[in-house]
Image (tube, rainbow, N blue to C red):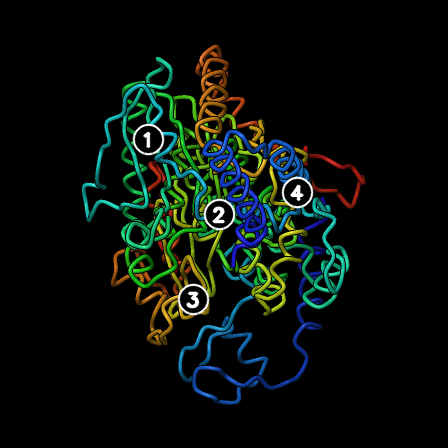
Amino acid sequence: MPSVADWLRGRKRQIERREPGLWVKCPGCSETLYRKDLELNLLVCGRCGHHFRMPAADRIVSLIDGEFHEIAADLEPRDPLQWTDVKTYPQKLAADREKSGAVEAVIAGFGSMGGIEIGLAVMDFFFRGGTMGAVVGEKIALLFEESARRRVPAIVCTASGGARMEEGLVALMQMAKTSAALTRLQDARLPYICVLTDPTTGGVSASFAFDADVIVAEPKAVVGFAGRRVIEQTIRQRLPDDFQTAEFLIEHGHVDLIVDRHQLKAQLVQVLSMLLPGTGAGVPA
Amino acid sequence: MNVIVEREKGLLELEQRIGDLKALSEQHPEASFAAEIRALEEKYASLQREIFGNLTAWQKVHMARHPMRPRATAFIAALDEFVELHGDRAFRDDPAVIGGIGRLEGRRILVLAQQKGRDTKENVRRNFGMVHPEGYRKGLRLMRLAEKFSLPIVTYIDTSGADPGIGAEERGQSEAIAQCILQLTRVRVPVLAAVIGEGGSGGALAFGVADRIIMLEHSIFSIASPEGCAAILWKDAGKAEEAATRLKLTGSDLKGLGIVDHIVAEPLGGAHRDVDATVTSLLREQASSLDALAMLPLERLLQERYAKYRRIGSWQSQSDRMVRGAT
């Protein structure tokens, strides 16, 4: 296992390479933001509160107290369908690795959050749209199984376009694999919290995401089963802007909480501290 | 335009001519049309072999969507007995799902089926087999009923996908599907799935997590419709035929990937050419699969189901270059 410091250094460097430039324009209010300020503010616009999509490594740093012990870090997909279109599937994977700095669309591991030991998996929309293939399915399944074995709660932050086309039905079946593994955690009566981040759709929203005990969403995150484009094509009309947003979901009764990124860690710790018997941990300031 | 329906037109013409000649020869027994009839029948047989002998993935997609393809109701009608149970107890009864208790060649079962319509009127009522959240929640309710009364669950899969509409999203399509999948991974009775037409995406999988999966020979099971896949990957639904080939969505492909257990052969020309024979073959396979599953002690059944799904999808590890997993 690589040391945590090395792991973070490697990931950080790659993130910087992904989005060069000193200034970033906010899609929420069109304000030009100084990159360093934005990063210090957890990628939330200081003016309008727009939550930028967050790379998995940044999210982990924002939630975990100190050390993070990544599991199954070096799993790489194979090519079950021998997929080729403009490029082969392995070529697409290599290009995404270069562009995003991520090895796959999820990072999973163990660490402490506000003094509570947890299993944490964070999906990365910057790697193949966060899609779930065999490796993502395996890491999520391992997280649930290993959390049950260590008797710690699990948290998954989702960001995904769904199952990964290039792995075909093998990818779709990861919905069943992750769900089966989740039953181990349920049987151990350990909490599982899902944090829905922008965007979470398809095979991820329709499997382990919406099976959580407590479901949290980030403000304005788009979450749904079918993609907006598909629905608009089906019904042949434009959808309202707030359709499938976190706010839409809470109004219709599908999520428990909408939590601003700055409060996320404290909120998760508070919920866990009440769900877990004998957890003395308070809410950090 | 269904490519199978198009290709069948020549056959139907021949059928018509053979029928006419036979009628004619009965009216005029003195004239002999035997030679003509035999020639036409030979032509018919060779055309049939040419058309159906080696269907491409794209042709199988169209066979799976054939307007005359037997629906779940055809198989349910052949059960010894069946009582349909309606509704999700919360919102509404979804006609795209048929659920109930029945008896398959003497075996008590719980049936869950996705049901397309036969004509426009029925298709409107059944929403073309596209299930709403309340349909999945009806399924979930019946899975629990099955567990309570130790009824093996037999599912029939035939949907292009879950309904992608506003109401479905408002009522939590994702959650409804997720709960069905989770429940089937752990339900404490045998689960036997049969793909009889289209197995489209997560909406099909909601009833498709099973101890054994059977596919009719010309049915398909896919991560997305070929049109949807082409639109997502290449922003061009016109490339659906290419997507159909690449997706490996036929029964033989999926058996090769270790996801599907049994393929049930269809009559030459497809299930709709001889519905009774298709129904008989599938029910026979279901009966023998149910008997095999009933032999397993429950804990072993559940362990094997867990292990089966746990294995699907292989990966390689950078450090040790090991390759693991089944498919």
User: Of marks 1 and 4, which one's residue comes earlier in the chain?
Assistant: 4
Residue B66: give its label.
Answer: 2
Labels 4 and 2 within one chain: yes
Give the foreground label among 2 and 3: 2
Task: Please indicate whether residue B161 sits to the left or right of residue B82 in the image.
Answer: right
Give the foreground label among 1 and 4: 4
User: Dots 3 and 4: beta carbons under 8 Å?
Assistant: no
Whole-angstrom CA distance, mark 4 to mark 2, is 19 Å
Q: Residue at x 52, y 26 (%)?
A: B212
Measured as percent of width and height from the top left, residue B300 is found at: 50, 16
Labels 1 and 4 within one chain: yes
Q: Residue at x 36, y 25 (%)?
A: B78
Amino acid on which disc 1 is placed: Met
The picture quadrant where one finds residue B141 is top left
Q: How many marks?
A: 4
Which residue lies under the disc numbered 4? Answer: B47
Amino acid on which disc 3 is placed: Arg
**Which residue is at the front of the view, B246 or A110?**
B246
Which residue lies under the disc numbered 3? Answer: A261
Quarter of the picture containing the C terminus of chain B is top right
Chain assignment, label 4? B
Whole-angstrom CA distance, mark 1 to mark 2, is 30 Å
Measured as percent of width and height from the top left, residue A97 is found at: 72, 61
Give the foreground label among 1 and 2: 2
